[in-house]
Image (spheres, rainbow, N blue to C red):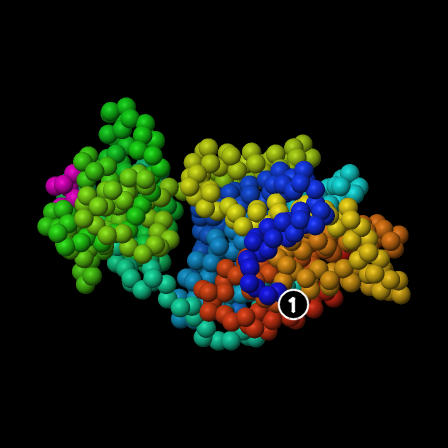
């Protein structure tokens, strides 16, 4: 509540304090780091990153959004999409995956992204309630039930309650978004301050591309004019693209547009960068492995005065053979480039995108006399495995749902497979793991267990049972639900469950009730932080891009919290009678 220390640091302090006071034995201090929860959450984050990188859900959203023009309808599409995505991908990953769609819709409507982002965050929290892997509290509660009864919650045991609350939340958010302040916008980032937009890149149409056989007009209409074709090269002849010109296999297109738009078109139509096609041919001829140069990535840089590139062409310098990098895109202020990239004479101030081994890039930039630009999320030139991550995730969910493989084993194997198959690189996999969350879980698990071993949970549960003695059964469930919702904004949702689950279980035992309804209430309450930007990573993620203030969350979130309490209690009792 003080906010002086981050939640993972606070968890470490709590573990050290428990060790110092003798509450946790030294032999048990680090058992939390070997707990299945840490493996499941870490693996789910890696799989989520691979699904996000594939762009499958993002493309589906864009197709749907083409038919929707009103803000309220767009909001419904975005919140429904992020909610259902959160059921199969960890909610923070689903939100990050669909945030670009919100920015695109806001840009088309000349509206502020703040209209969409906070409702999307709340929808991601509600969607995460629907399955075991949607959010960390569900995994922890499942473990608690297994410790108590010998049977964990299954993959879809959460779905009836979670789906009901999700539908109620969608209806509320569709109308209540007006409670948000209008016109809020994020402060521009360094990448946005660069204002580098007019890139051109050179691609080849392979046989499997859906663009083969289309006319130029059909190609541009299908991509809603996000990119332009400035020239077509066929059999060594360069021509201006007339609207009726038909595209053929092997054509080289010079495309222009913003980096995000170029990336979507190239990935969606399975186009090949001209430099990459040349490299693959060379590797086959020379028998070199693809991995010889290490992990391949892209970097955005500016040609400096005195650079080796100044006054030269990429083709003349033979960048790939001498330096091991490809020039795959470039931008020049005030000009619309239409020549082949290899034939453009580079000038100081040109912005270029180079592709090559990431570990060698700093040295290559120094040799070429180029300066790296401020970091931006530039995916131009990266490969996407389209359906592979989805298929691997579906397989893991099926195996766990059937009870054939433990959840931790299935998701660890799935995370390993998406890395081994190249659906996500090892570097990106590590970047997607939220290490502070794993540290917090590992440190707080033994502290949480101390509530049970020292009898503290019995004391708290007895006090709560005394309050609930005069309440009907639904009142007892509502009490646990309200308590979890009250704690999670300050304690983090995973930490809330670690503390509250033993208390809820003991509470149910004191009243003579079955524990499932109370554990489910704990999971729902811990997963529903709609009051602050600090209780859940989803809320924190949209704070800056939406330009929100701390108090904005309660304006939209307090009524939603009340709806969860009012409708969540009967839903829990309907499917989990006590």
Q: What is the quadrant of residue 373 in the picture?
A: bottom left
Side (left or right) of 159 relative to 361: right
Label 1: which secondary element = helix
**In terms of depth relative to the viewer, which is nearer, 435 or 115?**
435
Q: What is the quadrant of residue 367 in the picture?
A: top left
Residue at horizontal 40 percent and vertical 71 percent from the top: 110
Residue 397: % across, % down: 61, 40
Which residue carries the number 1 mark?
560
Residue at horizontal 43 percent and vertical 70 percent from the top: 185
Count the numbered circles shown: 1
**In terms of depth relative to the viewer, which is nearer, 200 or 251?**
200
Dominant secondary-structure state across the stretch colored magenta: helix
Side (left or right) of 313 relative to 277: left
Residue 531: % across, % down: 61, 67
The residue range painted magenta reads 313-318
Side (left or right) of 551 relative to 147: left
Residue 288: % across, % down: 29, 26
């Amino acid at each position: 509540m003080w906010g002086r220390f981050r939640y993972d640091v606070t968890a470490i302090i709590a573990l050290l304090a428990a060790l110092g006071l003798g509450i946790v034995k030294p032999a048990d201090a680090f058992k939390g780091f070997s707990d299945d929860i840490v493996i499941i959450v870490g693996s789910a984050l890696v799989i989520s990153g691979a699904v996000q990188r594939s762009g499958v859900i993002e493309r589906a959203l864009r197709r749907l959004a083409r038919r929707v023009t009103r803000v309220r309808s767009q909001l419904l599409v975005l919140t429904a999409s992020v909610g259902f995505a959160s059921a199969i991908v960890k909610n923070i990953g689903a939100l990050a995956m669909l945030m670009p769609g919100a920015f695109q819709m806001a840009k088309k409507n000349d509206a502020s992204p703040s209209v969409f982002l906070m409702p999307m965050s709340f929808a991601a929290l509600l969607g995460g309630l629907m399955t075991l892997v949607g959010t960390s509290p569900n995994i922890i509660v499942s473990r608690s039930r297994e410790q108590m009864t010998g049977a964990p919650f299954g993959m879809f045991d959460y779905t009836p309650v979670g789906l009901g609350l999700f539908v109620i939340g969608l209806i509320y958010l569709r109308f209540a978004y007006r409670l948000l302040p209008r016109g809020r916008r994020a402060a521009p980032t360094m990448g946005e301050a660069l204002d580098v937009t007019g890139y051109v890149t050179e691609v080849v149409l392979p046989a499997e591309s859906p663009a083969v056989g289309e006319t130029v007009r059909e190609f541009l209409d299908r991509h809603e004019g996000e990119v332009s074709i400035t020239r077509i090269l066929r059999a060594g002849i360069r021509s201006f693209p007339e609207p009726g010109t038909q595209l053929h296999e092997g054509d080289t297109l010079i495309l222009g547009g913003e980096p995000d738009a170029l990336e979507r078109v190239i990935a969606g139509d399975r186009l090949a960068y001209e430099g990459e096609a040349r490299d693959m041919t060379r590797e086959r001829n020379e028998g070199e492995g693809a991995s010889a140069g290490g992990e391949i990535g892209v970097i955005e840089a500016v040609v400096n005065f005195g650079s080796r590139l100044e006054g030269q062409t990429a083709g003349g310098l033979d960048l790939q053979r001498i330096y091991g990098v490809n020039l795959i895109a470039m931008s020049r202020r005030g000009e619309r480039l239409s020549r082949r990239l290899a034939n453009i004479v580079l000038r100081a101030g040109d912005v270029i995108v180079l592709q090559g081994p990431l570990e060698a890039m700093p040295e290559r930039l120094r040799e070429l006399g180029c300066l790296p630009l401020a970091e931006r999320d530039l995916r131009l030139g990266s490969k996407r495995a389209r359906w592979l991550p989805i298929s691997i995730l579906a397989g893991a969910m099926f195996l766990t749902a059937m009870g054939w493989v433990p959840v931790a084993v299935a998701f660890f194997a799935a995370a390993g497979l998406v890395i081994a198959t190249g659906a996500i690189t090892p570097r990106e996999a590590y970047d997607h793991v939220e290490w502070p969350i794993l540290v917090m879980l590992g440190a707080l698990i033994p502290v949480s267990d101390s509530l049970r071993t020292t009898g503290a949970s019995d004391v708290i549960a007895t006090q709560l049972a005394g309050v609930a003695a005069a309440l009907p059964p639904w009142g007892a469930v509502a009490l646990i639900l309200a308590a979890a919702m009250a704690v999670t904004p300050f304690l983090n949702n995973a930490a809330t469950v670690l503390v509250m689950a033993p208390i809820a279980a003991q509470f149910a035992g004191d009243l003579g009730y079955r524990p499932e309804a109370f554990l489910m209430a704990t999971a729902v309450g811990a997963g529903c932080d709609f009051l602050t930007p600090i209780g859940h990573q989803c809320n924190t993620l949209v704070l800056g891009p939406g330009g929100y203030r701390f108090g904005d969350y309660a304006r939209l979130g307090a009524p939603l919290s009340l709806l969860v309490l009012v409708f969540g209690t009967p839903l829990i009792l309907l499917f989990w009678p006590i």
